[in-house]
Image (cartoon, helix red, strand yellow):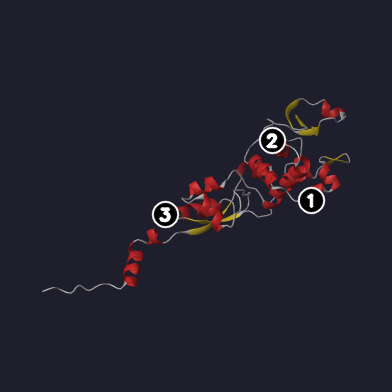
């Protein structure tokens, strides 16, 4: 004689599984503010997710991200709770400051970057070297960052770019209005790299196009060339 076995309804089984193994059933979701030096690959590795999932959740068409950008992080493993806790800890280091804070020497050292200053730097790179090789675009951004770090120039990105010395604009695009043109994706990538410390010039403070006659610039020691541009200290 067979003994009848009582079966649980499916929904009861699922409910019990969620109670016993919540981290295996639910994926954590939280926000993360991009910092200088970040990439989708690094963020994915840090929080146990994938680049493709990051792009899908955030509707990204490329791997390009910029400092100050807010990403939604959706983890897919049982380490979700730990990842969420780590994300909150990391974000607390950057969200206490204003989103419009100007980058200063101290901010550069701490890795804090405002979206507006990032965009300004990328627009200058576009205006000065948009038609030049990528190394020249990196070098233009590096000159701005080197000036911020130097005691010879103002100590913020905005002040460096808009500096007028003895009636002379330091950067021509500010004078002719080209600084207001939108930045290219390539210039944004270059800005992100130089904010993370990239400097192909090894400390250049000036640059010019070949063929100029400015005696001051021509007297400076050349430290890097790229395309039609020369970079000096």
Please state the horizontal and vertical placement of residue 143, each as a whole percent of the image: 73, 36
**Which residue is the site of mark 3?**
77
**Mark pair 1, 2: CA separation:** 22 Å
Number of residue marks = 3
Residue 72: mark in rendering: none
Which quarter shows the N terminus? Answer: bottom left
Q: Residues within 10 Å of mark 2 (few under 14, many from 20)?
A: some
Ranked by sequence position, the earlier of labels 1 and 2 is: 2
**Mark pair 1, 3: CA separation:** 44 Å
Q: Residues within 10 Å of mark 3 (few under 14, many from 20)?
A: some
Please state the horizontal and vertical placement of residue 118, each as a whole percent of the image: 69, 48
Please state the horizontal and vertical placement of residue 231, each as a whole percent of the image: 75, 31
**Mark pair 2, 3: CA separation:** 39 Å
**Visible residue check, residue 20:** yes
Q: Nearer the viewer, residue 218 or 128?
A: 128
Residue in the image at 67% along x and 52% along y: 115
**Which residue is the site of mark 2?**
135
Residue in the image at 32% along x and 71% along y: 10
Q: Is residue 173 left or right of residue 51?
A: right
Ranked by sequence position, the earlier of labels 2 and 3 is: 3
Q: Are marks 2 and 3 in contact (CB under 8 Å)?
A: no
Please state the horizontal and vertical placement of residue 189, each as a whole percent of the image: 65, 44
Place residue 213 in its image quadrant: top right
Element assignment for label 3? loop
**Visible residue check, residue 149:** no
Q: Is residue 9 left or right of residue 111?
A: left
Compared with residue 1, is residue 97 higher up or lower down, i.e. above or below? above
**Which residue is the site of mark 1?**
180
């Amino acid at each position: 004689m067979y003994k009848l076995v009582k079966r649980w309804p499916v929904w009861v089984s699922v409910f019990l599984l969620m109670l016993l193994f919540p981290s295996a059933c639910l994926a954590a979701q939280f926000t993360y503010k991009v910092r200088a030096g970040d990439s989708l690959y690094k963020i994915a590795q840090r929080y146990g997710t994938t680049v493709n999932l990051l792009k899908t959740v955030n509707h990204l068409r490329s791997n390009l991200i910029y400092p100050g950008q807010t990403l939604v992080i959706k983890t897919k493993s049982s380490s979700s709770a730990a990842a969420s806790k780590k994300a909150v800890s990391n974000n607390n280091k950057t969200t206490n400051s204003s989103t419009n804070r100007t980058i200063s020497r101290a901010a550069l050292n701490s890795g804090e970057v405002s979206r507006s200053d990032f965009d300004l730097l990328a627009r200058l790179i576009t205006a000065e070297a948009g038609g030049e090789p990528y190394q020249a675009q990196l070098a233009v951004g590096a000159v701005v960052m080197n000036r911020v770090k130097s005691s010879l120039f103002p100590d913020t990105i905005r002040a460096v770019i808009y500096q007028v010395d003895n009636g002379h604009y330091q950067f021509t695009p500010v004078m002719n209005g080209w600084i207001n043109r939108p930045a290219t994706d390539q210039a944004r990538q270059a800005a992100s790299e130089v904010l993370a410390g990239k400097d192909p010039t090894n400390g250049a403070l000036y640059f010019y196009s070949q063929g100029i006659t400015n005696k001051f610039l021509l007297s400076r020691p050349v430290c890097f060339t790229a395309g039609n541009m020369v970079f000096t200290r």
